[in-house]
Image: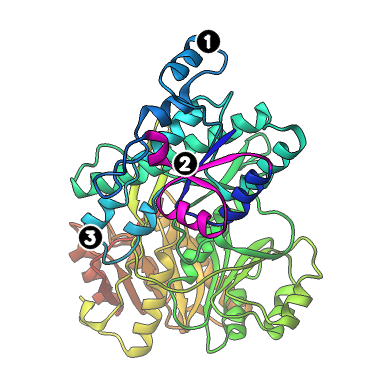
Amino acid sequence: MKALISVSDKKGVVEFARELVSLGWELISTSGTMKMLKEAGLPVVAVSDVTGFPEICEGRVKTLHPKIHGALLARRDEPSHIKALEDNGIEQIDLVCVNLYPFVQTISKPDVSMEDAIENIDIGGPSMLRSAAKNWSSVTVLVNPDDYDTVIEELRTDGKTSDKTRLALSAKAYTHTAEYDMAIATYMRDKANLSEKLFLEYDLKQSLRYGENPHQEAKFYKSHTVPSFSLANAVQLGGKELSYNNIQDANAALSIVREFDAPACVGLKHMNPCGVGLGSTILEAWKKAYEGDKISIFGGIVAANREIDLDTAELLQSIFLEIIMAPSFSEDALKLLQTKKNLRLLQIDMTKDTKSYKQFVSVHGGMLVQNIDLSTAKIVSDMCVTKLGVDEKQLSDLDFAWRVVKHVKSNAIVVAKDGMCLGVGAGQMNRIGSAKLALEQAEASLKEQGKDIRNEALVLASDGFFPFDDCVALAAEYGIKAIVQPGGSMRDADSIKKADEEGIAMLMAGERHFKH
């Protein structure tokens, strides 16, 4: 029995080869792998000795030879194939252990040249894998060191691998070459400015109990390049499994908390924030988030961008929540929160980066692709378009509201003050409808605190421009003192005029943040 071994990922390969030799297998190898096996004291035959032809073109050509591919592809149950091998002096190869040049790792380097990328495109490796995988009924093909133990155990027990194992390994080999070719195609197409094809690669992270509803099947897949603020690499420290809706909501909460550098807490339900707070500590931030809407947070999700300490955990533990996410939990806080057996506790990497990522949204028969909306303009006084300007305190409130409204379903309105979200109007078919919801909610929240909304000098943010001046007029009725909106309506002048009449400062950010 002969095994051809040529790997880039050399993890466990010496131990694997040693086991094969102990079972009476002969080893064939190339270049670096052969050197490693020889240094380990294992008997190895060079591919060039099998083919009778030297490696040429700086190693680009070494295994592309009939004595390799004939040995792999010949059907053992077909007499004419066996005769062809005998007539040409070709000996069968029964196992191939190959993984490919590190192309993806190479192009991931920030300073990689195209020349380096090209030299890391494997040719012989994929060819051997495809030949061996095609003949899986007779040939065992390995691409992943994790499968070495299974193969050795079967060889020890039965003297051969099972049909089931060979078929599974064949499928893994074709997956390996498909992923490899996809990475190369994506890289080369980018260099050639071709965009009519889209290749995606995701690995199954977990099967979910069901989708949005119990009758829908669902799975959660993760990308090979996982950014920060992602559930794909979350560490679950407590609670039951995440559901489809949990993942959707948690992702939305992480997108909001990512907006802030200061200690921030987000309470979220059904993809929209029901409370957002900033503070000097995470405890203060949570208190503000909770006070903004004590009712809606019930059964919701909380994301914090600082460690959850014991004081904060005690407040969180006192209400019913589905998920709490943070970069870390203090030992005492974790111990307390883990007493609620169904509460999911997720440790999330919240390291900020400036990379741009793609967002994929499926539609029936198609896919929409866009850059994730990571850019948020800082609200500054130069954006003011009214006679009345704003002070630093109002600017801070407007900037906070602008970062929150960006993540509210359109049409979106947010009312805020002192780093605290007081009212949210989301997903209405017209903007005035969202404004009414946000202002009424803010009024109710302040009334509970014994305050009159008309005396609080609140600010308001809108994710889209005002098509009419009705939102400004309504805001004036509730005592709003400053508004930020994108601008860009044909009737901007009407809204500015109304703001001047009502003594409201209006700022136009010059960017829009629709969220559908």
Q: In the structure shown, which secondary structural element does the residue marked by tag 2 occupy?
A: helix
Q: Residues within 10 Å of mark 1 (few under 14, many from 20)?
A: few
Locate residue 335, reporting x and y percent: 78, 76
Q: Nearer the viewer, residue 24 or 308?
A: 24
Q: In the picture, residue 414 is in which quadrant?
A: bottom left
The residue depicted at 39 percent of the width and 64 percent of the height is 406
Q: First in sequence: mark 1 or mark 2?
A: 1
Q: Establish if 121 lies above or below 413.
A: above
Colouring rule applied to residues:
rainbow
Q: Amino acid at mark 3?
A: Ser
Locate residue 324, reporting x and y percent: 65, 68
Q: Is residue 370 left or right of residue 400?
A: left
**Mark 3 vs mark 1: in front:** 1
**Mark 1 vs mark 2: in front:** 1
Q: First in sequence: mark 3 or mark 1?
A: 1
Q: Establish if 444 lies above or below 42.
A: below
Query: Disc 3 designates what residue?
Result: 113
Q: Amino acid at mark 2?
A: His
Range drawn in magenta: 23-51
Residues at circles 3 and 2 in contact by the CB criterion of under 8 Å: no
Q: CA distance from mark 3 to mark 2?
A: 24 Å
Residues at circles 3 and 1 in contact by the CB criterion of under 8 Å: no
The label on residue 79 is: 1
Q: In the picture, residue 446 is in which quadrant?
A: bottom right
Q: Residues within 10 Å of mark 2 (few under 14, many from 20)?
A: some
Q: Amino acid at mark 1?
A: Pro
The label on residue 176 is: 2
Can residue 36 be found in the magenta stretch?
A: yes
Residues at circles 1 and 2 in contact by the CB criterion of under 8 Å: no
